[in-house]
Image: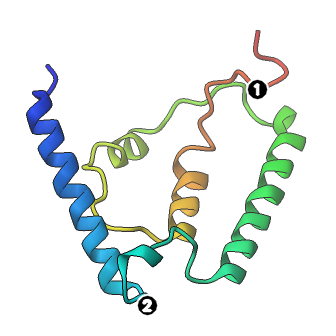
Amino acid sequence: MTAPKSATKTYHNRFTSKLIKQYNMSSNSTTSEHETLDPVNWEKTRELMHQMVDDAIDYTANIRNRKVWQEIPLEVLKKFNTSLPLEPTNAELVYKEFTENILPYPMGNIHPRFW
């Protein structure tokens, strides 16, 4: 059963308003016309992005050494049974969660022995 459109819209509006308010409180800009999605620290963002590219290349280069499919452990599945975050999350933490809880359990379609 899906939520009524009005409930979804109300949730979306509250979520969006909260994010905008939080951003405005943490922003150095004095007016909303200067809002941006730019990272606070470009150098840290650059380092993380380089790490992501390196990890993706290593993952692809070593794909033949991995299982074609691996069942997701129950403790990992339970981590996905949570509410969506309402607050911003550090990009490094998001990437760490991805590498620990998503990347190890592909559906097999990139593996050379998947057919």
Classify mark 1: helix, strand or loop. Answer: loop
How far across and how far down the image is residue 113, in percent? 82, 18
Type of the residue with mark 2: Asn
State which quarter of the image contains the C terminus.
Answer: top right
Residue at mark 2? 28
How far across and how far down the image is residue 106, in percent? 63, 32
Residue at mark 1? 110
Residue at position x 85%, y 22% from top?
112
How far across and how far down the image is residue 2, in percent? 16, 23
Looking at the image, tell me whether mark 2 or mark 1 is earlier in sequence order. Answer: 2
Classify mark 2: helix, strand or loop. Answer: loop
Q: CA distance from mark 2 to mark 1?
A: 44 Å
Vertical position of residue 77 compared to residue 87: above or below: above
Extreme residue toward the top, this view:
115
How far across and how far down the image is residue 45, in percent? 67, 74
Answer with left or right where residue 22 lies relative to residue 28: left
Query: How many other residues sit within 10 Å of disc 1, few (<14), some (14-19) or many (≥20)?
Result: few
Q: Which residue is nearer to you in this view: 4 or 98? A: 4
Q: Quadrant of residue 70?
A: top right
